[in-house]
Image: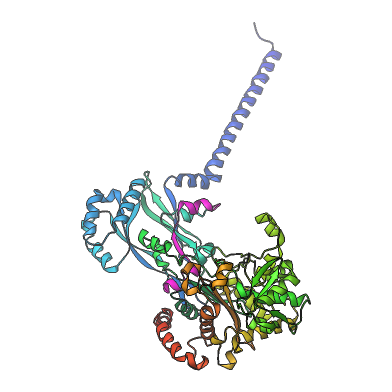
Amino acid sequence: MKRPRVDTEANHRLVTRRAAILGGVQLAFVGALGARMQFLQVDQADQFRLLAEENRINIRLIPPSRGEIFDRNGVPLARNVPSYRIVIVREDAGEVEDVVQNLSKLVSLDPDEVERAMAEMKRSAPFLPITFAEEVSWEDLSRVSVNAPALPGVTPEVGLSRVYPLGSDYAHVLGYVGPVSDYDLERIEDPDQLLRIPRFQIGKVGVEAKIEETLRGKAGARRVEVNAAGRVMRELDRQNGIPGSDMQLTIDAKLQSYVQARLNGESASAIVMDVQSGDLLAIASAPTFDPNLFVRGISSRDYKALTENKYRPLASKSVQGTYPPGSTFKMITAMAALEDGLIGPDETVYCPGHMEVAGRRFHCWKSAGHGWVDLETSLKRSCDVYYYDLAVKVGIEKITAMANRFGLGERHDIPMSAVAKGLTPTKDWKRRVHDQSWVVGDTVNASIGQGFLLASPLQLAVMTARLASGKAVKPRLIKTIDGIEQPSDAGTDMGMNENNLRKMRRAMYAVVNDRRGTAYGSRIIEDAMRMAGKTGTTQVRNISAAERRAGVIRNEDLPWERRDHALFVNFAPYDNPTIAVAVVVEHGGGGAKVAAPIARDITLQALYEGEPPLEAYPTKDRGRIETQQQMLRGMQPVANIAGSDQA
């Protein structure tokens, strides 16, 4: 039966529609597939190429060269020198023990270093080079190279090593570098990947540690092709890093070398500071140590010798050490009274050798007393009773406030380790720390720099510079970084009454230049170089009433650790101050006898920028000084370093 024409046309239209829909779906699928293929193969080609290359290309860090350090005149203090080392690759060496034995016939190997290297080799991948000898000589390196065929896996390499040309002169200022330890990594919040390079060195203490990131620089990188085991096949390209910044310190190397030599034999410290700019020209602590011993790891014997020395050579006494300032603090007590209008320069106090305060007797250093003394005489002869009387009138709060204005009780911002804050006590401080009330006797003790008061030599130098200038000068240690001058802070005017400052300066001048002054024996004869200063002697033991009745034991008759500390501060020249000096000799005895002569010699060396003429000294001292100068010349390595560098 023939299908009607209408039905046939309807079926045809239905089939055509279905074919069109199916074709459209197929076309859309093919189009989407093509677009995806274009996205993956064209648009994302670089990303997938990188992912593929990551399976065969590694990025290796290149350590930058460390910034070098110089003194204010360009004398090198910390340098990088070529260092030859010998490394062994375990997979190339075969029997490592046999190779090491053959190597030891050519060069001297430290058994401890060999043991350390063998342990490191067992922990490391077989294709990584392990250092077996460092700082080998060129001759040793040549012998290894000539015998290379008999030493499989052994490779001589050249790197950079830190060296301190002036040795111990700058140990406490610069510090030293050493390999990164686990402790170093733990205390750094986000350690640079450089620090994870085996045996990479960083600053441990001193300027090397405090300016570490600036000195370290930025790592470079090299792309190397490695095989499936991670072994390097070839280097593809290299991008060098940014070397660390070179820097200049404010220190004068010649002066620093002299100060260290002058302190030799003492447990002492000294600071020389520019009164106007705050530049620290010398920062010395004695005894000292050779920082080069620490660069590759100090031996147990050497380290034990340093830690067991009762003079504490590892301590930077100039900034870390804190001491009762003794009579060097009397200027602060007097300034507090003068600025408060409680005394005049002509007012006198009678000193019978002691003073009764709250039922307790406070003694003057001179048991017979000084009689009637005014401000200048009290400072010149260092009368304690005069300052006891001031303390009762002024009170501890005003004395402490004045001490703070002159830089005591402040942690000064210089890049050295463990810079001390010292202590300027108040009533609240004693209640908080000791759970005790402040008593008037505490104020009396503080007036002469005893009791709770503590100050570092750095703080005493700042105090003296501010007395000399009337400005809140701040210490500076970094002069330039990559040739760019760093800001100095000469300080703003302290707002002190200039007449009061002049009175203090005149009194300090009398201490040194008046025949009855406590430091007259350490005066400077040259008129243009005359100095003003103050002696200080601080007790480290209690003197009982029975001992006073029987006679106080002389320092010379006491064990070293029970002797008084000796202090001296000064500025010069008196008419136009340029430098301030602070000297502390631990358990040295009297400030006038021990500290003042050292400070005078340092002052002259700084003012003359070298060895001063004998005519600057009192006639009676010139023979001794000439002998001393001859001895000290041989103890100053900077002369040879500077001379050869300039040549």
What residue range appears in magenta?
A: 165-190
**Can residue 570 be seen by looking at this rendering?**
yes
Where in the figure is residue 450, as x and y percent of width and height?
62, 69
**Can residue 488 be seen by looking at this rendering?**
no
Number of numbered callouts drawn: 0
Side of 419 relative to 199 (left or right)? right
* Location of the C terminus (image quadrant): bottom left
| Residue at left offset 20%, top offset 57% | 150
Where in the figure is residue 321, as x and y percent of width and height?
54, 67
Q: Is residue 186 covered in magenta?
A: yes
| Residue at left offset 50%, top offset 67% | 562
Which of the two residues, 271 or 266, is positioned nearer the viewer here? 266
Side of 367 relative to 128 (left or right)? right
| Residue at left offset 55%, top offset 67% | 540
Q: Name which quarter of the figure residue 351 lies in.
A: bottom right
Where in the figure is residue 48, as x and y percent of width and height?
50, 44
Which residue, as the protein is rendered here, is positioned at the far right?
341
Where in the figure is residue 207, as x and y percent of width and height?
52, 67
Which of the two residues, 390 or 473, is positioned nearer the viewer here? 390
Can you say whether 611 is above or below 19 in the image?
below
Q: Is residue 178 covered in magenta?
A: yes
Can you say whether 463 is above or below 203 in the image?
below
Which of the two residues, 455 or 438, is positioned nearer the viewer here? 438
* Location of the N terminus (image quadrant): top right
Q: What colour-coding does the image apply?
A: rainbow
